[in-house]
Amino acid sequence: MKLVRDVLDKQLIDREECEMGRVSGLIMHVGEKSQPRITYIVIGGETLWMRIHPSLASFAKRLARTWGPKRDGPVRIPWSRVETVGRDIKLDVRGRETGALDWEIWIARHIIEHIPGGGEKGEEEE
Amino acid sequence: MSKALQIALGIITSIGGFLEIGSVVTAAQAGAAFGYQLLWAILLGVLCLIFLVEMSGRLAAVSKHTIVDAMRERFGFPFFSIVLLVMVLVAFLVLVAELGGIGLSLQILTGIGFPWWAIPVSFIVWALMWRGTFSLIENGASLLGLFTISFAVAAVKLHPDWGSTAHGLLPTFPGDQKAKYGFIAVSILGASISPYLMYFYSSGAIEDEWDESYIPINRVIASFGMSFGGFLSMAVLVAAALALRPKGIDVDKYEQAALLMTTALPRWGFYLFGVAMLFACLGAALEISLAIAYFFAQGLGWNWSENLTPSRDARFSLVYTIIIFLAAIPLVLGVDPIKVTLMGMALTAATLPLAIVPFLFLMNDPIYLGEHRNGWISNSVVTIVILISFVLAVISIPLQIMGS
């Protein structure tokens, strides 16, 4: 597997077939005696913007702390939860429990569900 | 649904959804200023569009990726973010133009100025997106767009000289007004080769769950649908050449474009123009709003589908909600939709390489297309037309701005 071609920027799907975002970055463990290995998949604006410029990353970080679901730091998913890497990356997690869908849920609860026809409150829990 | 019915519906919706304010205004300007001389630009644009639309459908059917999906994956976020920024800005301009087109159509039908229509029109477009499904937007709006066939009726009733019309299909250099000629040619190419149409089409193929068995259907729909749509654009140009040019009318205002119908159909041509353009611009506004929301959602990996309840793809729904209401602001302030249209079309042409070159790389990538990747004919046609559009845009846009 080639990490940049096959993993980075790939679509992440949870066990309920929900789209959780794309792979923003990867965390690698480099031991002195063991071979380097991928430990976490990272999802989140801060890591994503860091790939363009650090100042954009710090802006994204400040925004995430002051507005919306107020999350501290990007979401990390252990590599051990990866089920398959193909067209998408299938994860053995429930997306909404990882924090990857915090913005989706926040926008649904605070904006969309208040507009008539936006959907029943709590509908997404079904 | 049987395959034959799918093909028929696909062709009909392509025809109904082909014309919008950009293609009509640019073709009318071309006919009014240069007679049949710029028919070649429509032919070239439509030829390129046929190839691009076919490729968009093939990519989705074979790889199960939309263009945006594959672009983010293949080229990474830093490059994708540049494409996102540029494409969304240009598509936003085009959305302002289409909402303005609906407002202007209502203006000529009711006499009430277009700025008053900006908010109600945006609200209706948003409500159709909010409550509607993908097939309602794809089929419903495009079927109403079939009113635009009246342009072909008007052109035929004006008895064009078919020999001169055929001559116009070959490029010629103008005697004078070279900058204007180049600028209109670029605007026509920009209006024909709309990247948003490709994003919309490939997303639609995923929404409709296409697989490899759809490749022949896709080819027929792209070829016939876009060709017939292109004929309607040519009909507008021909009608303008016959109705407006002899009277020395230049199309600077929307009402002037409406006159191309009144010569052929004196009693109700003016109102028919209003109704046809109302539905054509409505369909285009829906498609562009959806294409912008698709771009964000697919590129950033959010839930997306026009068939879901908005709370189930909240970020996707929020994007089109914000974009539609932002697009109403310049119109409320009285910005001229015709000027926005011409600038939007020329900028579309100037930015085509950014949209199309990465797409061509994808279409030649065996990881995505396997044995169905592009042949040399598709690659050559698209590359040549994009190159022509870009060079014309780079030369004529500054000249036109300096000239005006």
Image (cartoon, coloured by chain):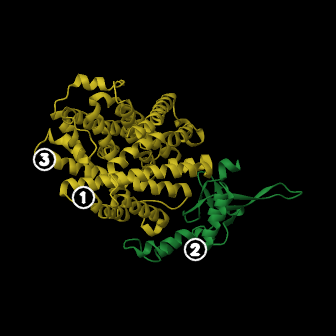
Q: What residue type is labelled 2?
A: Pro
Q: For mark 1, give the secondary structure.
A: loop
Output the chain of dot 1.
B
Residue indicated by mark 3: B268
Q: How far apart are marks 2 and 3 (CA)?
A: 56 Å
Which chain letter goes with mark 2? A
Q: Quadrant of residue B172?
A: top left
- Circle 1 residue: B113
| Marks 3, 1 in one chain | yes
Rendered shade, chain A: green
Specify the chain shown as yellow. B
From the viewer's perspective, tell me whether residue B316 is left or right of residue B110: right
Q: Name the residue under label 2.
A: A69
Judged left or right of residue B244, residue A80 is right
Q: Where is residue B155 in the image (x, y as percent from the top left)?
A: 20, 35
Q: Check contact, mark 3 vs mark 1: CB within 8 A.
A: no
Of badges 3 and 1, the one in the foreground is: 1
Rendered-image quadrant of the C terminus of chain B? top left
